[in-house]
Image (cartoon, rainbow, N blue to C red):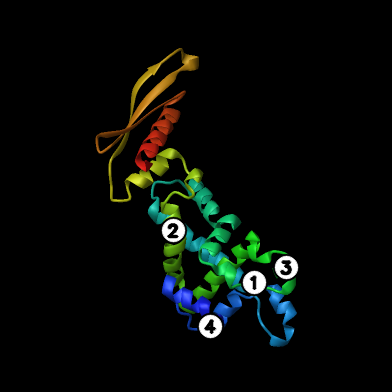
């Protein structure tokens, strides 16, 4: 087993595998197994299958708890953004897993170490191995350090509407009252314009306008977010 990998897992994530063979399998690509048949190794594909299910469960639980007012459809969309291939390959690179995957020469020479699909599978395989070695909460603890901070920081906020994102930001420190107040509307019926203000605990934090009440609220939330992020 690569001692540098085990050292980094310990130092960065406080993870020490009881069964190092599981960890080794998670970082073994099928191309490496095919080129070293005499070693009777196992590749990471079965672990990837398991890790995929574990990841979806823990991310679903996290979103359910953290976003209690988000409807099912938007929860599904946000989860899909977090667990898709390009996101997971990014997480794998953040953890420097790409440096430790064992590849066959052909896969290595064709740029496999940078291939998003391969890194996505690697990340899921690691989760599967960690789950078998230490259980669901250990995987949750790892994701809390690697994945969930990016969710909280808004890395996937483009998958959510501005009102939902504003609520998430404002309620990080506890419950607050968020109110949208229609203050004005003007124009003929077919070209009506609405103006809305958004308040947090009776403090004005944003103004917006739009061709419907909903659009004006979204614009107010977007402007409030822009001010908060400055």
Relative vertical location of residue 45 with respect to residue 76 in this rendering, above or below = below
Please say whether residue 50 is visible from this viewpoint: no
- Which quarter of the figure is the N terminus placed in? bottom right
Asked if disc 2 and disc 4 are in contact, CB closer than 8 Å, the reply is no
What is the quadrant of the C terminus in the image?
A: top left
Assess whether mark 4 and mark 3 are in contact (beta carbons under 8 angstroms): no
User: Which of the numbered marks, if any, corresponds to residue 45?
Assistant: 1
Examine the rendering and report whether any part of residue 175 can be seen: yes
Tell me the distance, in whole angstroms, between the alpha carbons under discs 3 and 1: 21 Å
Q: How far apart are labels 1 and 2 at the CA level?
A: 25 Å
Of circles 1 and 2, the one toward us is 2
The label shown at residue 109 is 3
Tell me the tag on residue 20: 4
Alpha carbons under labels 3 and 4: distance apart: 27 Å
User: Of the numbered discs in the image, which one, if any, rests on residue 148?
Assistant: 2
> Which mark is nearer the camera, 4 or 1?
4
């Amino acid at each position: 087993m690569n001692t540098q990998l085990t050292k980094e897992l310990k130092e960065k994530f406080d993870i020490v595998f009881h069964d190092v063979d599981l960890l080794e399998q998670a970082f073994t690509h099928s191309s490496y197994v095919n080129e070293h048949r005499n070693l009777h190794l196992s590749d990471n594909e079965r672990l990837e299958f398991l890790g995929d299910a574990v990841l979806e469960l823990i991310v679903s639980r996290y979103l359910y708890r953290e976003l209690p007012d988000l409807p099912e459809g938007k929860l599904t969309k946000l989860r899909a953004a977090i667990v898709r291939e390009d996101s997971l390959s990014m997480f794998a690179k953040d953890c420097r897993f790409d440096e430790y995957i064992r590849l066959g020469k052909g896969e290595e020479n064709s740029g496999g170490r940078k291939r998003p699909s391969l890194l996505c599978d690697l990340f899921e395989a690691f989760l599967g191995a960690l789950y078998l070695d230490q259980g669901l909460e250990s995987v949750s603890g790892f994701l809390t350090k690697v994945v969930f901070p990016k969710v909280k920081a808004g890395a996937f906020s483009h998958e959510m509407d501005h009102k939902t994102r504003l609520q998430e930001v404002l309620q990080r420190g506890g419950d607050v009252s968020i109110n949208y107040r229609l203050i004005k509307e003007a124009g003929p019926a077919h070209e009506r314009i609405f103006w809305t203000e958004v308040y947090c605990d009776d403090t004005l934090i944003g103004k917006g306008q739009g061709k419907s009440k909903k659009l004006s609220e979204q614009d107010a939330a977007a402007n409030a977010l822009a001010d908060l992020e400055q």
